[in-house]
Every structure is written in structure tokens, then in C-alpha cells.
Image (spheres, coloured by chain):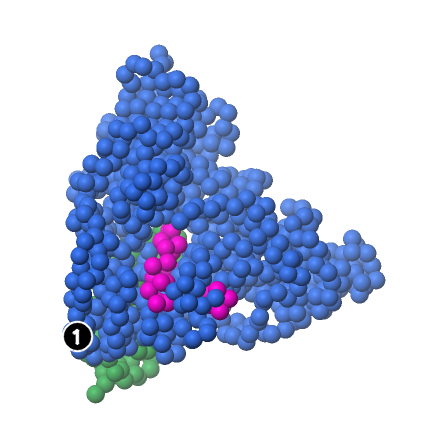
Amino acid sequence: MKVFRPTRRQLLAMGLGSVVAAGGLAVGIKLKRRRDRVLGAVVPRDQVFVPGALVSVGVDDRVKIYLTKTELGQGVMTALPLILCDELGADWDRVEVVQDLARSEHGFMLTGVSYSVRGDYDALRQAGAVARELLCQAAATRMGVEVGALSVEKGVIRGPEGQVLRFGEVAADAAELDLPWIGDRPLRPASELSLTGRSPPRLDVPAKTTGEAIYSMDVRVPGMRYAVLARPERFGAEITGHDPEPALALPGVRSVHRLPSGVAVVADSTWAAMQGAEQVQLQTKGGLQLDDAGIERRLTDALETTGLGVVEEGVLSPEAPSVTLELSFPLLPHLTMEPQSCTASFEGDRARVWAPTQAQLDLRRNASGWFGLPEEAIEVHTPFVGGAFGRRVQHDFAEEACLLAKACGEPVKVVFTREQDSRHDWYRPPSRHRLAAWLDDEGRPSGWRHHLACPSIVGRDDPGYAQLDETYVEGSRLPYGISAKQVRAAPVHLGLPIGFWRSVGHSFNAFAVEHFMDVVAKAGGHDPLELRRGLLGDQPRWLAVLERAAEMADWGRRPAEGRARGLAVHACYDSWVAQVVEVSLDASGPRVHEVWAAADVGIAIHPDTVRAQLEGGIVFGLSAVLSGQVSVRDGAIEQSNFHDLPILRYGDCPEVTTDILPSEARPGGVGEIAVPSIGPAVANALLALTGAPTQRLPLLST
Amino acid sequence: MGAELEVNGERRTLRASPDTPLLWVIRDELGLTGTKYGCGIAQCGACTVHVDGQAVRSCITPLSAVMGRSVRTIEGLSDHPVQRAWVAEQAPQCGYCQSGQIMSAAAAHDEGQDLEGIERAMHGVLCRCGSYPRIARALRRLEADR
């Protein structure tokens, strides 16, 4: 899957240009009476003013904003509409947010790369501005005044002499006006924005505290059956035969179907389908011949090759390096709390899919092939998603549901058991790193060499892949002012299903860079903060977060006996994060007591969500470095459930303090940014505590 | 012959076989989807319900074990102090684990446990999104409001 990073211009052109080209008004938004089970609102038909694909206004003043990203828990359901509402001047308490279907009008429907707010920011403001302009034009005509004499606030347009018109009163008139070119409308000054930076309560939180929020696992459609697949253990194994009889003999089991990825047992209940799948005997042949030792060997061998150039600055000394480090990172599972699932319904000339997807249009394009229907005949619905972290761009669960729905002629929900979810994932790739540094007479690094070997997600299906791409090198371009730098990377083909895992290449490269920086600091006799300060002289945004985190933690203060501090700083997805941690070590392993994190995310649209994502990324990243791994034997994953895939528990969670640096810069990414720096901060603290660097993750491996 | 039990204050007769885990009876037969499946082996706590006021992992509790008893699911809580604290601290992220978190906290709270006791209960409910710091703040708010 190609990693597509559109420019702002492209995004505007795709999302809104198509609307203008189609004549603008009322394109495609067909409003039906339906009950939104999540928000509990009945949506009326009389949304008469529809200036584009993102917002509509009704005669009753109701403003509907269409959400084109997936709410994964990262707060986009609140933050994105808030941007538009703020620019428009609508009443936030009267706004209804609608998770929209997959529609071409929305251009680029991908929720990932921490790109929702920073990617849609301009388009949302422009959409709000256009709607405000047209409503004001209509109001100005009605009032007999100049547009410039009007002010807009909370869904009300006020004239110079106290005249008042509500949005609903001018919506029909506004709908008659020509749509201006969307893309260069003048925007409100920051002083007029009343929601941005204020953190109104998140719209999805109440439903998530009452059991009312509907996730993919919860979708219920009349006549729906439940399906669980029996799957070959070994990746890539071919099913040569199966015996359906023991499954069919179970009460509640209705049918058994052969699919490319396994044998599906279709039943009247989830439990019957799970029981049935366990009864299916599969005969398989072939598949991946690989185990952990083999992975290690291939990565080590690849480190001996020249690799591809990522950074080449200055000339490295021919002398032996002063200090070196080898690092190994494991395969990591996503372990979303909600296992994979998908519901599909095939109705001959139409189809519907309810999928926990991060890529709606990609899914619809593929579903067109699975169903044998044109894309426009397929409705893709997005329920709430119980955790994504990159897993939900892989549509294996959707393919299975769609093929089954077509085969059965009934709506079907495919459910992965936890064991299947763990063993049939698209894992964060493993990697091996070799770092070397040369120190000058003052013990500061004058040369830096980093060689890494890692499978490429882009090239995962191509044994001959030899391209450089960001999925395995991002995060290795260190910001430090070291006169000679060499970073080279070798893509390695393992044949394993690998995929995007929260912060992708940054998740291991940031660890390598930031942990080795501390190893270098120690070798040269320098304080890790002081060394970085000296090497970040021309990088103000790096320095600012570093200094703030150090200040929050009171870096100069000696911690209690038996404890040590470590720090790390990293930038990814247009944001900067620095962290300080305090750890201790006992017989059971490292214990993280406190974390202080400072972040520069540009304008923080919804600061409380930014804080939540920092906290969440810290816990997610910490869990991974402490105990995250899956191991491979005979081409299959050895682990299966939370008993052998431990994740951080409540009682082991450190105290977390976060701070967002004030900024006027464009919004940066938020969802993934705290993950890369927590791990190296912990490793650096352990280095300070024990004198020993970390060479292999996870830290608590037995 | 159906199993009889009380669910959220209503007498219900259930068709599922007695060895069916309560989790799937609640979700599929009763259509109460607030109680979640996370692991099926009582490791994650997402399936937590109350049986006669006690927190129970419904994924490993067969229907036969709760016949004649009183079951409460997340849908049966009504403006509980735990729910209010969760909203005040904006605790949920993806929210999938939160029914289990809230039910675990509510059972301990209603039993009269102190903060330490409630926190011990929370150790049994996993969150992948890292809402633990906010849950901690919500529990402290709950304690303060008592």
C-alpha cells in the first residue's frame, strides 16, 4: 500500500473542487429520516442549505457537519467539526455531527499518519467561511445592509441597527446563491474564534460511558448471521481440504463456506460460530518457513550490506569509532481492545458494509471487486472503532464479510476471536540497528553512523524490493549538529504480514537515535540534556520542548535513592515531543514512576484531546517497550491472548504530566506523536541507573 | 425450558443453552451490546457485569451459573456517580473498554470500597488507549465528591 501524503492544495482540490465542478449545491447529500443510535438524534429532511459536502443548515437552525474521518478515540469527531463551526459562527450546542458514508466528494478519506486535523484544517475553515459568506449575503439582502456591516455569532447574524436573523431564517435564501470558489475565502482572525483552543466536552464521551456507542462488533442488522473463520496457523499456507461436518452438527450453525483466508462457519450467534470454527478440521500445505532465529539472521546479514543512503553529510573518520551500539526490535501486534469484525449485506444490485475502517474509499473500491458491483452501489458505514493504531487500514475483515454476504445471501458479521486477532495481524516490523559514534577531544560527537535493516511495508509482497521509503527510515534523520553523519538502511524481505503500527518507522528509529545519544553522552562524560542543547543550536522547536520537559521534571534535581531519570526528544508528523521519565529497578524489572511530556503541536485545536493523546501514546509506547512482542515459529505466531501478550495494567501506569507549548504555527499531528520518545526515555533512565545500555526489546522479556 | 433471570431489573427467560457464556447471551440474545468481548478468558475485564451486585467476568460465566439471580449490565446503570466522574474527566478514548472499567469501578464503589480498593479492582481491566491517567483522576474526583 503506497503511503500517500497529499499537499494541502491537493486536499482542497480533491475534497471541494469536485463539489464546485459538479455545480456546487445539494450534490449527493441525500438526507433520509434515520435514527442515529450513537448521537440519539433524529435527523430531519429540511436541511435546505448545502454549500458543499461538509456542512448543511436547516430551516430550524440545525447545523449538520459531516465527519469524513473515523473516530478512533483520538477525538476527531469533536475537533474537526469544531474547526468548521468556529469559522462558520454556528452555535456549537446546536451542531449535529454525522459520521458520513464513504463518498467521493470527500476526496481523501484516510484516517492515519496523524493527519486528520493538520490535513483537513484548511478545507474545514474554508467550508465554514463559504457557508458564513452565503448566509450573510442572504441576510444582508433581507436587512437591506452591506455584508460588511454584519456580525455572526452562535448561529445568529446581527445587523448594524440591532436587526437579528437566525441561520434557519436565511438558509433557503442562501441556497439560491451561487457558490464562490472554495479555497481562498478570507478567514476570521484568531480573536473571533471562540471554540478553538477551548476544549468543549467531546461529543462521543457520553455514549461511551453508557454502553450506547455502537462499535463494529455491536452492529445488528435484521436477519444477520454471525461468522467465525477457521484459519491456517502458518502464514501463506494453502487450504487443501476441510471437513465441515463436525461444525454443521452443532446447534445454531447454518452453513460452512470456503474463503481465500479460511473456512467460515456461519451461525445464529457469535458463540455458535466460535464453537463451530473450532470444530473445522483444516488440511493445509505450504506457507511461510520462518522462525525468530531466521528473522534475526536475515536482519543481521542485511546489516552487512551497503544498504540505501538516507543521510550522507561530511566524511566519517577512518579510525575505529569511540562507541557503538547494536539494537534489536521485535515484531509488535496492534492488540486493539475491539478485535477485528465487519458486517456486510448484499442485496443484488446494492450492498452495505459496516466496517471499523481507517480508509473508507479504499474499502469501497475493493468492495466493488468483492461484490461485483459499481462503487456507487455500495454504502460504507463507519461505526465507532475500539482502537485502531494502524490496524484498520488492512481490510481483511471486510473482504471476508463481503464475500460471505454474497455467498450466503444474508447479512453476515465476521468476528475474529482474540486469538485470531493476535495471530492474524499486520505487525510492526522487526529491525536491527548498528550505531557508531566518533568523539572529539571534548567528548562530543563529531561523527555518527547508523545502519538499519528492516522490512518495508511498501515492499512487503515483493522479495526483490530495493527502494528507500519512509515506512522503515522515518525518524532516523537526526536533528543534531554533528559534522559527519551517515544513515543507511537495508530493506529486508521476510514474507511476514507487516503493517502500519502507531508512529510506524518512528517507533524504532527514534529509540535508536535517542538511546544512542545517551550512550554517546555517557561515553563523552556529558549530561544528556546539556549535550543535546549544544547540538540543537539552530533548531528552536526541538530546543523548546526539550527545555520545557526538563523544566517540568526539574532535571537538575537528584532523584530519590534507587531511582534515575532519562530524557528523549523526537519530532514526527509536524509536531515535537520531549519526555523525561523517572524509573527504578527491582527483581521484577523496570518500574516507571513518573513521566513529564512537553509537546509543540502548533495550534492546539482541542487541547484536552492533545493531552489525552499524549497520555495515551505514552501508555501505548511504554507498554510496548516493557512487554510488547510476538515471536514466530514454523511461520506462525506463538502467542495468542493477553496471558502471553501482556499489556500495561492500571496499577503499573506511571503518573503522567503533560504540557502543550503555546503556538501560532499550523496544527501539527497529534495521534501518534508521544509514542516514539517514551521508550528511549526509559532506556536512558535505565542507562543512568545501571550503566548498561538496552540492546534488545522488550525490557521484560523472559 | 428457558433459563430465568433478572436483567437490569426485568425478568427474562432465555433460550440459550445453559453452558453459553453470559456475555454472548447478553449481547446476542438480549441485544445489550454495551458489554464487550475483549479476550474470552477473563484477562481483560471488558465483559464485566454485576451479578447480585458483584463484579463478574461474563465471558467465562455460563448462563447456568446465574439462573434465578439478578444481573446488571452497563445499560442498567442510570446516571451513576462513576459515569458522571468519567464524563467530567473525559476519561474514554476509543471507549471500548470503558463499560468494563465503569462496571468494575461501580461495583467496588457501591460495595463501599475506598479509593485503594477501587484502584485494585481497576487493575483487572485493560485499556489499550491509555486512559488510565484519566481513570485515576476520575476516581479521585469520585472520592472527593463522596
In front of the other: A688 or A150 = A150
Q: Residue at 32% x, 47% y: name it.
A: A461
The blue-tinted chain is A
Query: Residue A427, can we see it?
Result: yes
Query: Residue B53, can we see it?
Result: no
Q: Amino acid at mark 1?
A: Glu
Tell me which corner region of the image, top left, top right, bottom left or bottom right, holds residue A535: top left
Tell me which corner region of the image, top left, top right, bottom left or bottom right, holds residue B119: bottom left
From the image, state the color of chain B.
green
Residue A264 image offset from top left, x and y in percent: 26, 68
Q: Is residue B31 above or below residue A587?
A: below
Residue farthest right in this picture: A144
Residue A245 image offset from top left, x and y in percent: 17, 75
In front of the other: A662 or A415 = A415
A191 lies left or right of A650: right
What subunit carries mark 1? A
Residue A40 image offset from top left, x and y in percent: 49, 71
Q: Is residue A2 above or below residue A144?
A: above
Magenta region, residue range:
A375-403
Queried whether the magenta region covers residue B119, the answer comes back as no
Q: Quadrant of the C terminus of chain A?
A: top left
Tell me which corner region of the image, top left, top right, bottom left or bottom right, holds residue A662: top right
Q: Is residue A489 above or below residue B102?
A: above
Q: Is residue B29 above or below residue A96?
A: below
Query: Which residue is label 1 attached to?
Result: A245
